[in-house]
Image: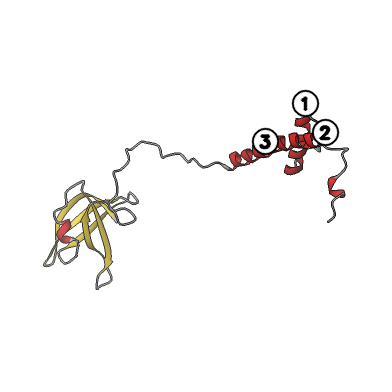
């Protein structure tokens, strides 16, 4: 757990000497108090802790089944066991995602289908004998292809023979 020391106080419990550490958990922002006694593994490091210093402490259960700080090291450790890099400046916005939204992805697919349909419409018209098709002819045929592929909107090829009737199943 990564912590930042707020204050320390010397405490005595019977014959045991220790310190009471008031700290902020840097992972969840919660402020807590933890007694650390001379028989705990983290005591030698934490006894010299100063306000504002950051530590990585490891909690473990003692022989009485209490959670104690078994070890401590100065500095904050990242999630993969390496020292964390510099903190980002407060108040800066988080980086924005560069992934497409579902709406953007859907719109992009429509662009791709329309562009491909224009190319295929020109090829189709050339193959059917139109050596110099007009813009209106290309768009009309491309719309038929787009509507066929996307299966949406009004039927622009109403009155044209249904191709699926001619294809054996």
Looking at the picture, tell me which residue is in the foreground, 68 or 108.
108
Mark 3 or mark 1, which is nearer to you?
1
Is 20 placed above or below 67 here?
above
Q: Which mark is first along the chain, 3 or 2?
A: 3
**Contact, CB < 8 Å: mark 2 with mark 3?**
no
Location of residue 167 in the rendering, given as x and y in whole percent from the top left corner: 84, 51
Q: Which mark is first along the chain, 1 or 2?
A: 2
- The residue pinned by badge 2 equals 129
Mark 2 or mark 3, which is nearer to you?
2
- The residue pinned by badge 3 equals 115
Looking at the picture, tell me which residue is in the foreground, 36 or 131.
131
Asked if residue 142 shows in the view, the reply is: no
Residue ID at (20%, 48%): 53
The local secondary structure at tag 3 comes to helix
Location of residue 94 in the rendering, given as x and y in whole percent from the top left corner: 41, 40
Asked if residue 27 shows in the view, the reply is: yes
- Quarter of image, res 130: top right
Neighbor class of circle 2 (other Cα within 10 Å; few <14, some 14-19, many 20+) is few
Residue ID at (28%, 43%): 86
Residue ID at (34%, 55%): 79
- The residue pinned by badge 1 equals 134
* Gap between marks 3 and 1 measured at Cα: 17 Å
The local secondary structure at tag 2 comes to loop
Location of residue 81 in the rendering, given as x and y in whole percent from the top left corner: 30, 57
Q: Which mark is first along the chain, 1 or 3?
A: 3
């Amino acid at each position: 757990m990564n912590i930042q020391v707020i204050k320390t106080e010397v405490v005595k419990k019977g014959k045991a000497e220790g310190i009471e550490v008031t700290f902020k958990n840097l992972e969840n922002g919660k402020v807590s108090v933890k007694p650390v006694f001379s028989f705990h593994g983290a005591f030698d490091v934490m006894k010299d802790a100063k306000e504002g210093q950051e530590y990585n402490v490891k909690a473990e259960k003692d022989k009485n089944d209490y959670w104690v700080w078994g070890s401590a090291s100065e500095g904050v450790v990242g999630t993969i066991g390496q020292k964390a890099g510099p903190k980002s400046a407060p108040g800066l916005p988080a980086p924005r995602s560069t992934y497409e939204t579902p709406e953007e992805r859907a719109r992009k697919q429509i662009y791709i289908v329309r562009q491909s349909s224009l190319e295929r419409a020109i090829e189709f018209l050339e193959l059917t004998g139109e050596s110099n098709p007009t813009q209106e002819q290309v768009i009309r045929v491309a719309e038929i292809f787009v509507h066929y592929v996307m299966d949406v909107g009004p039927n622009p090829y109403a009155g044209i023979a249904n191709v699926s009737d001619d294809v054996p199943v």
